[in-house]
Image (cartoon, grey):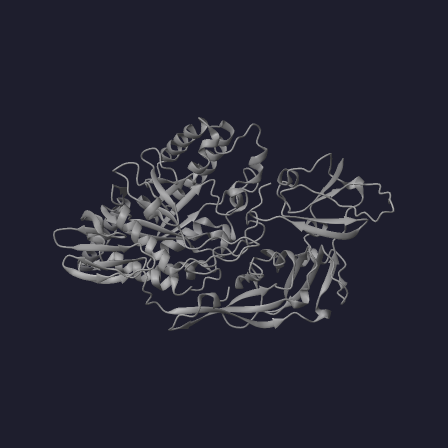
């Protein structure tokens, strides 16, 4: 090597070391206006995505679309019950690979907000708690209880240490800039008496002691102890948030609900993009908000049995990215334009002097101004009128329930009620019908009347999770009754008081009927846990060979029957779904992977099923011979099932909202 080349090489080494030093010195803090990243206040838009509700193959595209939509941060819960299903045995594989998910976010240049909880709610089974926690002696959840605190601290520490080991906190050069401990505890805290506040203080101190190098927050916890930041969850945090509990803390919105999660027996409640945008702009204007997270930005799919009571398999399908990861227009585009409009005025928003005043009975102005830059938010709360207001000697006409953002306090750059984004509608196309009888096989679930094989004997109905240990949805009760006819034709009725979803009754092996509850309801026996088909995994290729499947005939379809067939993978790259509109209630597997519970027989007030399309991620499929297995509780007609592809059709003019396919 020549002397000149050696000098160049030395210079390169010095520059590389300086770059490493800069990364190591990265810092996250906060003040009363914003999170501070490397010494600069940041205006941050975030979107919630849950790694457990999609697949690793979907993550890159989901994150890329979020970034294109103007997001800076991806926020996710950490799901204790998938990571530690058995005490001391951890699982971070496949769609539970939290580290891989975070590294993909980092690779695309976005930050991470990590909500460790470990109670998360999230319409997730048991609120994210592993069921074995239920059997810990003397435990009382989410309280100043030593057994609970011991396990909570152990799991939170395990996650934090994993993140540190992988170098994922921002001061280490990673993407995680903030974490959350607990979740909406203030809603239940009064029930715990004096133990509640002690638990809050303990949880905050425990989290801070882990020294992650990034701030911690508590959502819906107005008295979050310093230095933990209190944040808001809800539809309208610009109106409902009490504000930071210290002048040194910023206003954060951890859950801006983009729709409402759907339950079986209900119709979808979509939230308009205009309403979401209005709420975001109002939070920034009124509360000096500098962090807004959309819950959900992509909801995804509740695979397997992880959905909480009555919650559909499809989760937050009306989010900016729908269940399949498709762009939901115009919501995605309208919010993207909002993010751009806000960010072009980041300097006055984060550093300017704030003032507000009335422009009319239901109109107000919010102004952020530095010596050289200014941004104003003109708010109209009136839902029907279009008033004219004068702001700084300029006349503006405000649309009903709208906020106009004025760059330089003069020029309208965004109106929440005016959609310029392209519209789109989702379509579902049948690509394969499974109507041929000879392609189906059936196996009738045995009804257990052999009392010698019973697991329990009791004089009352049991708390079902305690009896099943959450290994199954199904619990058999067997009771004998000597019936003596009176000759007057009086009917014999069976009355069951239970909070279970549904009860199916059989008398002398004959099905006599079913009855179910609803999401709104709050209201000497022999038992057997689970189903034969579950215990023998007959929904897998290997397990299906352990039983004798019968040819399905055209006679009445029986309840509690397993059905099996095969289908080909649709060509192309469009999303794939099963249309189960002809079925009743049960669970469905494709190549051994559960794509979730279905319940199309429980109709919504509209008369339609709450959900009829069930997502099959393409990664679950093989080129040919995909094995489809269903457990049908109610009867149903599997010959009516179709394999569909799902796509978005874009068009310039807005279609009627009710016409968009779900």
Residue at 18% over, 56% down: 7
**Residue closer to the observer: 437 or 519:** 519
Where is residue 217, by image quadrant? top left
Q: Relative to residue 388, is residue 461 drawn left or right? A: right
For residue 239, above or below residue 635: above
For residue 551, above or below residue 148: below
For residue 620, above or below residue 487: below
The reply to whether residue 653 is visible in this rendering is yes
Q: Relative to residue 465, is residue 450 drawn left or right? A: right
Residue 146 location (% of width, % of height): 49, 27
Q: Residue furthest left?
A: 371
**Residue closer to the observer: 623 or 116:** 116
**Residue closer to the observer: 444 or 231:** 231
Location of the N terminus (image quadrant)? bottom left
Residue 476 location (% of width, % of height): 72, 44
Q: Relative to residue 267, is residue 39 drawn left or right? A: left
Q: Relative to residue 484, is residue 279 drawn left or right? A: left
The reply to whether residue 166 is visible in this rendering is no
Q: How many marks?
A: 0
């Amino acid at each position: 090597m020549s002397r000149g080349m050696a000098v160049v090489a030395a210079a390169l080494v010095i520059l590389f070391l300086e770059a490493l030093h800069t990364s190591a010195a990265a810092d996250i803090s906060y003040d009363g206006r914003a999170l501070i990243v490397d010494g600069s206040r940041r205006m941050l838009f975030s979107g919630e995505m849950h790694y457990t509700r999609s697949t690793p193959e979907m993550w890159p595209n989901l994150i890329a679309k979020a970034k294109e939509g103007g997001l800076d941060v991806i926020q996710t819960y950490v799901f204790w019950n998938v990571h530690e299903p058995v005490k001391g045995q951890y699982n971070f594989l496949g769609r539970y690979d939290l580290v891989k998910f975070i590294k993909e976010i980092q690779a695309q240049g976005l930050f991470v907000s990590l909500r460790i909880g470990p109670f998360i709610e999230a319409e997730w089974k048991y609120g994210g708690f592993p069921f074995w926690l239920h059997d810990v002696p003397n435990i009382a959840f989410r309280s100043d209880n030593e057994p609970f605190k011991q396990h909570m601290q152990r799991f939170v520490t395990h996650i934090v240490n994993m993140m540190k080991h992988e170098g994922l906190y921002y001061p280490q050069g990673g993407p995680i800039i903030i974490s959350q401990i607990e979740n909406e505890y203030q809603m239940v805290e009064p029930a715990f008496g004096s133990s509640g506040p002690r638990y809050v203080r303990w949880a905050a101190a425990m989290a801070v002691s882990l020294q992650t190098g990034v701030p911690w927050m508590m959502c819906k916890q107005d008295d979050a102890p310093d230095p933990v930041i209190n944040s808001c969850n809800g539809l309208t945090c610009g109106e409902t948030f009490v504000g930071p509990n210290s002048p040194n803390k910023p206003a954060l919105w951890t859950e801006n609900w983009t729709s409402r999660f759907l339950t079986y027996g209900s119709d979808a409640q979509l939230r308009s993009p205009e309403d979401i945008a209005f709420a975001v702009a109002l939070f920034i204007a009124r509360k000096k908000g500098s962090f807004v997270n959309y819950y959900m930005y992509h909801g995804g799919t509740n695979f397997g049995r992880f959905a909480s009571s009555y919650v559909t398999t499809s989760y937050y399908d009306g989010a900016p990215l729908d269940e399949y990861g498709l762009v939901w227009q115009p919501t995605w585009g309208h919010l993207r334009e909002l993010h751009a409009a806000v960010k072009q005025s980041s300097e006055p928003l984060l550093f300017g002097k704030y003032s507000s005043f009335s422009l009319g009975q239901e109109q107000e102005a919010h102004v952020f101004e530095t010596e050289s830059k200014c941004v104003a938010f003109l708010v109209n709360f009136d839902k029907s009128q279009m008033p004219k207001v004068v702001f700084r000697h300029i006349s503006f006409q405000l649309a009903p329930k709208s906020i106009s953002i004025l760059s330089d306090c003069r020029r309208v750059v965004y109106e929440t009620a005016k959609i310029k984004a392209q519209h789109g509608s989702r379509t579902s196309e049948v690509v394969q019908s499974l109507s041929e009888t000879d392609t189906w096989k059936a196996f009738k679930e045995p009804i257990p009347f052999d009392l010698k094989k019973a697991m329990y004997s009791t004089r009352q109905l049991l708390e079902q999770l305690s009896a099943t240990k959450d290994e199954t949805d199904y619990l058999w009760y067997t009771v004998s009754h000597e019936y003596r006819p009176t000759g007057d034709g009086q009917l014999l009725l069976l009355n069951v008081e239970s909070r279970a979803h549904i009860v199916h009754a059989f008398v002398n092996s004959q099905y006599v009927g079913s009855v179910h509850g609803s999401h709104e309801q709050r209201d000497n026996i022999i038992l057997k846990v689970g189903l034969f088909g579950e215990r023998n995994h007959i929904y897998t290729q290997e397990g299906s060979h352990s039983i004798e499947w019968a040819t399905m005939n055209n006679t009445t379809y029986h309840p509690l029957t397993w059905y099996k067939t095969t289908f080909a993978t649709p060509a192309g790259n469009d999303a794939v779904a099963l249309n189960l509109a002809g079925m009743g209630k049960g669970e469905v597997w494709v190549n051994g992977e559960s794509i979730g519970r279905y319940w199309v027989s429980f109709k919504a007030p509209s008369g339609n099923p709450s959900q009829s399309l069930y997502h099959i991620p393409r990664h679950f499929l093989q080129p040919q011979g995909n094995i489809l297995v269903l457990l049908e509780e109610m009867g149903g007609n599997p010959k009516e099932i179709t394999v569909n592809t799902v796509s978005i059709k874009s068009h310039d003019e807005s279609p009627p909202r009710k016409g968009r396919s779900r």
